[in-house]
Amino acid sequence: MPAFNAIINALELNPSIIVDLAEEFSPSRRHRRLHPDKWSALEHIAHLARVGSMLNVRLKQMLKHPDRAVVPYDPDRDDPEGLKTADWNESLSRYQWDRAEFVGILREVDPPTWERPVPHPEYVRYSIRLMARHAALHDLSHGYRIEELLSAGDA
């Protein structure tokens, strides 16, 4: 199975990187945006928590109903005020909890199921492997943005 262990290990370890970043933010800096149209650290953390919950639902659906089309996730439909007002600690905990569940389920997936095509209206091909890899990269993308906010100091 291409990169199975690497993807699973990244998914398991990425929350530690995000939490390490989060621990460096004082409460007064969690809401700060560098640009009005860019997210704060809190918004990134809250988004990761929302996506984590969605991924678990999606994975369970893909395993139980592999012929059912995946419902696309559109972050623009999320309530932006909900991201801004989310609880920092609860969001971090939920992200870690949901990710542990996701990884636990993925570790039980057999090779044919890992690669089995699942219909998705936005992708030419989609599978559990592609979803898992996308999730691992998604974590790091948001982690990078959080790192930028941390590195910006008081600029």
Image (spheres, rainbow, N blue to C red):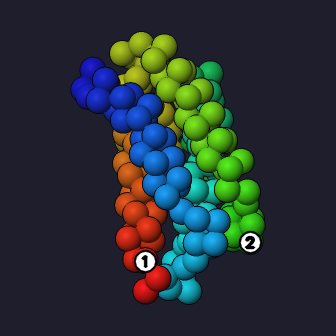
Please state the horizontal and vertical placement of residue 32, each as a whole percent of the image: 58, 77
Residue 95: give x, y in percent of width and height: 60, 43
Label 2 crowd bin: few (<14), some (14–19), many (20+), radius 10 Å: few
**Image-based side of 90 in relation to 137, left or right:** right
Mark 1 or mark 2: whose residue is earlier in sequence = 2
Residue at image location 49% in from the left, 58% down from the top = 24
The circle on residue 81 is 2
Q: Quick one: quadrant of the C terminus? A: bottom left
Q: Amino acid at mark 2?
A: Glu
Q: Which residue is mark 1?
A: 153
Examine the image and state in which quarter residue 136 appears.
top left
Q: Quadrant of residue 100?
A: top right
Q: Residue at x 37, y 39 (%)?
A: 133
Q: Position of residue 102 (x, y in %)?
A: 55, 29
In the foreground, 39 or 92: 92
Farthest residue in the left direction?
2
State whether residue 119 is above or below residue 21.
above
Callout 2 secondary element: helix
Instruction: Please indicate whether residue 34 sits to the left or right of residue 91 in the image.
Output: left
Observer able to see residue 126: no
Q: Indicate left or right for 42 with 148 as reference.
A: right
Q: Which mark is residue 145?
A: none
Q: CA distance from mark 1 to mark 2?
A: 25 Å
Q: Residues within 10 Å of mark 1 (few under 14, many from 20)?
A: few
- Labels 1, 2: front one: 1
**Residue type, numbered disc 1:** Gly
The residue that appears at 45% across and 71% down in the rendered structure is 149
- Residue toward you, 41 or 58: 41
Whether 29 is drawn above or below 17: the answer is below
Q: Tell me where residue 132 appears, x and y as whole percent.
A: 43, 36
51 versus 37 height, above or below: above
